[in-house]
Amino acid sequence: MTLFRNSSILRLGLACVLIAGVSMGQAQSAASLTKHGHKVQHKLAKYSSGRYLHLVMRDSTDSYGALGTLSEDSFTFTRADNNSIATYSYNDIDKVKTDKEPIGQGTEPRYHIRHLVPIVVTAAALGAAGAVYAVER
């Protein structure tokens, strides 16, 4: 019964245990992604699995290859130089680049009619205006 008589010691011990538990929880969550890591994760989530990418690491090395599966803290990447599968953390990546010219099925050049129509209409209007001007003169 002397334990309950010194309730201030009991409260102090309980406070120490709670503070230690909170600091341990913060230490575990500190291992998660940085702000830049979240940006890299968001950018990689836009690409489908198997997409050919160029990764620039934080230590200025380059890696070319195909994107694999994404997880919360890391992703798999099949390197093009030796077909080995590497696992990278999002925090290790500086930049994600794609090739200017994609290769493979479905990447043929597309001709956009929406750009061609205003050009043809403008040329026809100028030709008609020139013809009217020549007749009037």
Image (tube, rainbow, N blue to C red):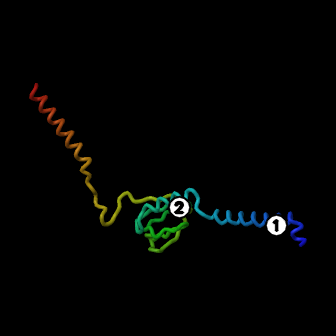
135 or 113: nearer the viewer? 113
Residue at 26% over, 48% down: 114
Task: Give amino acid for label 1.
Answer: Gly
Left or right position of 16 against 98:
right
54 or 35: nearer the viewer? 35
Q: Which mark is residue 105?
A: none
Residue at 49% over, 68% down: 70
For residue 104, which quarter of the picture? bottom left
Mark toward the start of the polypeptide (2 vs 1): 1
Left or right position of 112 against 60:
left
**Outermost left residue:** 135
Mark 2 or 1, which is nearer the eye? 1
Residue at 84% over, 67% down: 10
Instruction: Please tell me how crowded label 2 is: few (under 14), some (14-19), or many (20+) other residues with Cα within 10 Å.
Output: many
For residue 18, which quarter of the picture? bottom right
Residue at numbered disc 1 = 13
- Check disc 1 and report its element: helix, strand or loop: helix
Residue at numbered disc 2 = 93
